[in-house]
Amino acid sequence: RAEVARGEALFHAAGCAACHRPAFTIATAEGPRQIRPYSDFRLHDLGPGLAEAAPEAGVAPGEWRTAPLWGLGHTAAVGQGRASYLHDGRARTLLEAILWHGGAAEAARDRVAAMSANDRAALIAFLESL
């Protein structure tokens, strides 16, 4: 779909792919294989809005490991029609989850917030395709 392709371009243009890295090549017994986790699996400071009072040992309160986005489009099905996002389910929609991002992701969040409604819809269509 054209909307999904446009959403993917917007995902990259907003800067989301800086942390939600689309692909890696890994070694397997059969040889190199590409996986598409949409994560860098690193810790990033996402700001005080997502800070936890009792973080994991050695992790700052606002730091989170980049969640893989693969399978994101199946969230509602897994939740029996009720989707929730982020580590604690506080976001009821993908856009709400994006808007909770702060800290290192603040600039990307702001670019998404500034998008037109049609561009945000294309971005969400892309995310739901994963």
Image (cartoon, helix red, strand yellow):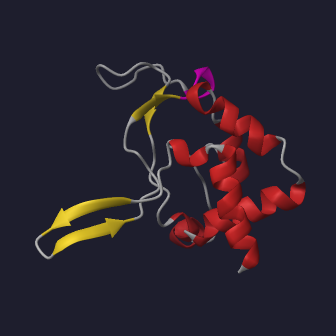
* Rendered-image quadrant of the N terminus: bottom right
Picture layout, residue 101 above or below residue 34: above
In the image as oriented, which residue stretches furthest toward the left? 29
| Residue drawn at point x = 65 percent, y = 66 percent | 126
Residue 104 in sight? yes
Q: Is residue 117 left or right of residue 85?
A: right
Residue 97 percent location from the top left of the image: 65, 45
| Residue drawn at point x = 41 percent, y = 21 percent | 54
Residue range (magenta): 46-50
Picture layout, residue 60 above or below residue 91: above
| Residue drawn at point x = 60 percent, y = 33 percent | 105
Q: Nearer the viewer, residue 37 or 48?
A: 37
Q: Quadrant of residue 86?
A: top right
Residue 92 in sight? no
The verdict on residue 66 being magenta is: no
Residue 129 percent location from the top left of the image: 60, 72
Residue 102 percent location from the top left of the image: 63, 29
Q: Nearer the viewer, residue 96 or 115?
A: 115
Q: Quadrant of residue 112?
A: top right
| Residue drawn at point x = 47 percent, y = 57 percent | 22
Picture layout, residue 58 above or below residue 36: above
Q: Nearer the viewer, residue 8 or 41?
A: 8
